[in-house]
């Protein structure tokens, strides 16, 4: 913002800034795809063992760490995650390290599910048919009649989010983790939320989580190999965006040396 230093309020660590302005380079400000960017020194973090390409995952991994902090799973929790995108796969690994005794990932067959298995992100995998997943959803409910302690919707599909509540066990948590359109709406039965005492959580951004995230990634406790499966030179910027659109890239990165993985 244009505010001077004296105009900012001092907040204790962990205190939410409330209605303060949220600015981000590459989102609300320029700088996401520039070869050189200027940042305040206090916003720069050091890492030791990560490659530059894997370091591009610090932001989505920080979102996963923030999600873990919001969920706070109890030891021995059973977890069901819908979706196998990059930040979801990192959250699945974090949940396994922090109370998730049994983690199940349900996602369509393809690149992302193959990646989930290669990362050993879960204990169980449900490969959903892209055309007729209803039979598998029904079987999932049959195999888990009491539901799961934690259900994470990480696809951004309002249809799946709406149905996800029916997989949550009594006293469990439903985590709204995907990215949805502003106009999106869901309909949940309030009697189920009330009667089963279900907690519905939202998790957004990476608030306060960069230092802890660097420790997880630097130590290798959260595995990232293969998440960035395509790299491009800066002049191939258009190709990088197209690889995201056509879904040939799980995660694409711009690199500034001779190593590209196109």
Image (cartoon, rainbow, N blue to C red):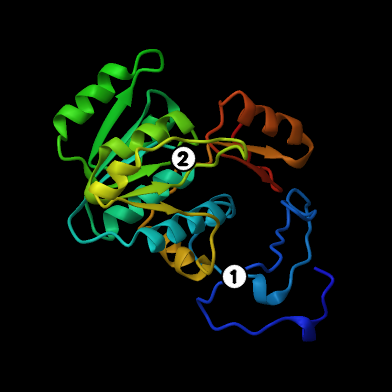
Q: Residue at x 40, y 13 (%)?
A: 131
In the shown orientation, is residue 138 left or right of residue 13? left
Q: Quadrant of the N terminus?
A: bottom right
Q: Is residue 42 visible to us here?
A: yes
In the shown orientation, is residue 31 left or right of residue 111? right
Q: Which mark is residue 126?
A: none
Which is nearer the eye, 112 or 199?
A: 199
Tell us which disc is closer to us: 2 or 1.
1
Q: Is residue 120 visible to us here?
A: no
- Residue 253 figure quarter: top right
Q: Which mark is residue 45?
A: 1
Picture coordinates of residue 238 (x, y %)?
Answer: 75, 31
Q: CA distance from mark 2 to mark 1?
A: 23 Å
Q: Which residue in the structure is indicated by mark 2?
A: 226
Q: Residue at x 53, y 76 (%)?
A: 15
Q: Quadrant of the C terminus?
A: top right
Which is nearer the eye, 160 or 192?
A: 192
- Residue 46 figure quarter: bottom right
Q: Residue at x 15, y 35 (%)?
A: 145
In the image, residue 109 above or below residue 230: above
In the shown orientation, is residue 201 left or right of residue 181? left
Q: Secondary structure at mark 2?
A: loop
In the image, residue 131 above or below residue 167: above
Which label's residue is closer to the chain start, 2 or 1? 1
In the shown orientation, is residue 235 left or right of residue 48? right
Picture coordinates of residue 201 (x, y %)?
Answer: 41, 53
């Amino acid at each position: 913002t244009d505010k001077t230093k004296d105009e900012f309020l001092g907040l204790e660590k962990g205190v939410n800034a409330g209605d303060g302005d949220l600015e981000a380079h590459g989102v609300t400000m320029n700088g996401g795809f520039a070869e050189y960017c200027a940042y305040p020194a206090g916003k720069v973090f050091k890492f030791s063992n990560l490659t530059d390409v894997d370091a591009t995952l610090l932001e989505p991994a920080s979102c996963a760490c923030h999600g873990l902090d919001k969920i706070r799973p109890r030891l021995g929790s059973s977890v069901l995650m819908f979706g196998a995108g990059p930040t979801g796969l990192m959250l699945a690994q974090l949940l396994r390290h922090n109370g998730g005794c049994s983690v199940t990932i349900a996602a369509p067959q393809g690149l992302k599910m193959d990646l989930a298995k290669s990362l050993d992100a879960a204990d169980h995998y449900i490969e959903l048919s892209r055309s007729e997943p209803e039979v598998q959803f029904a079987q999932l409910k049959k195999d888990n009649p009491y539901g799961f302690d934690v259900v994470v919707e990480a696809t951004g599909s309002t249809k799946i989010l709406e149905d996800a509540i029916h997989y949550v066990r009594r006293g469990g948590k439903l985590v709204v983790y995907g990215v949805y359109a502003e106009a999106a709406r869901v309909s949940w039965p309030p009697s189920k939320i009330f009667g089963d005492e279900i907690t519905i959580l939202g998790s957004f951004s990476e608030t306060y989580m960069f230092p802890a995230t660097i420790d997880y990634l630097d130590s290798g406790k959260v595995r990232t190999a293969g998440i960035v499966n395509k790299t491009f030179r800066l002049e191939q910027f258009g190709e990088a965006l197209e690889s995201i659109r056509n879904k040939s890239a799980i995660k694409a990165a711009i690199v500034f040396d001779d190593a590209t993985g196109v």
